[in-house]
Amino acid sequence: MVKRSVIITTIVGLVLTIVFAPKAFSQVTFEYYALKKYHKWGIITGPVLYNRAKLEPQYGEYTFENRPIWGFNAGFDYDFHPANKWSFITGLIVALEPVYNIKYSFKEEDIYPQFKGGDVDKAKMYAMTSFSAPLLIRLNLQIGDKMFMNFRTGLKVMYFPSGFASFSLTYHNKDNTEAREVFGLKAESPDNWIQGSFVIGTGVSYALKKILIKANLVYVMNFQNTMEGEYLFDNLFVSPRSYGFYKLSGNYIGLLFTINLAKRQKNGKRTSISPSR
């Protein structure tokens, strides 16, 4: 858990960035003529891959495998000065936050006899939806008549209500007269509902007649774990109890696509692309 002072400092810094960054970048007058044809608003969508959770075993020989977790981002962004070389971007991103993606196995001697050779299985779970607002500085460089490369970095504020999730595994004997709960995992999100993260990324954009298409590769690193908890293996026939801690950072790499529509002229037609200056 982060200290309250850290949270307050982060929020204050974000507020100051929102207030002063757009004004500062408005002073940068260098513009790409080809990009003046598009709206400031853009629609975002794309897949993300969350890092594996980490285990901190305390005792016992049993653990389990944590796997990367696929997710999906959707939302919109707002580029204050889309035609400028430098600009400031914000918006709203919606994501389904993961809890776990695990693979576990049990030795033959630790479970009921009908499981010849032991048992191997997988389990995956997602938590509730999060809402995030990026606060990014963006640099645009033209690399072709209609193609641009961008670099971006900054912060992201995430609204993620605290919650609890659990997983348990119970084996039954062959005639279903006896059962043993052999594995349990529980995790919860932090008490503070507002979390912060660092964002860095790069991408390319291509200017078409009616739309501007952007593809950005981004990496998001949270200031605190999104889920923390503990696991327990118990009631096994031979092996002793195993216990440890579970931590999911919520960090991810994403490939996000953005589409900005071209502006309409007064006659109802969209403006066309002219060669950049």
Image (cartoon, grey):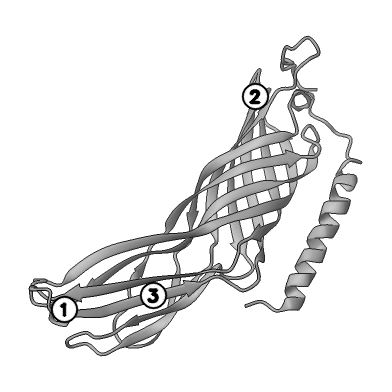
**Residue 91 point in image, percent of width and height:** 70, 45
| In this rendering, position of residue 246 left or right of residue 272 | left
Q: Amino acid at mark 1?
A: Ile
Residue at left 83%, top 31%? 31
Q: Amino acid at mark 3?
A: Leu
Judged from the image, the secondary structure of the residue bearing numbered disc 2 is strand
Query: Which of pointers 1 and 2 lies earlier in the amino acid sequence?
Result: 1
Of marks 2 and 3, the one in the foreground? 3
Q: Amino acid at mark 2?
A: Ile
> What quarter of the picture does the N terminus occupy?
bottom right
| In this rendering, position of residue 57 left or right of residue 83 | left
Q: Quick check: 63 above or below 86?
A: below
The quadrant in which residue 36 appears is top right
Disc 3 target residue: 185
Disc 2 target residue: 211
Judged from the image, the secondary structure of the residue bearing numbered disc 3 is strand
Judged from the image, the secondary structure of the residue bearing numbered disc 1 is loop
User: Can residue 56 be spotted in the picture?
Assistant: no
Query: Which of pointers 2 and 3 lies earlier in the amino acid sequence?
Result: 3
Disc 1 target residue: 111
Q: How far apart in space, not on screen, are marks 2 and 3 (Cα)?
A: 47 Å
The mark found on residue 206 in the picture is none
**Residue 93 point in image, percent of width and height:** 62, 48
Q: How far apart in space, not on screen, are marks 3 and 1 (Cα)?
A: 18 Å
> What quarter of the picture does the C terminus occupy?
top right
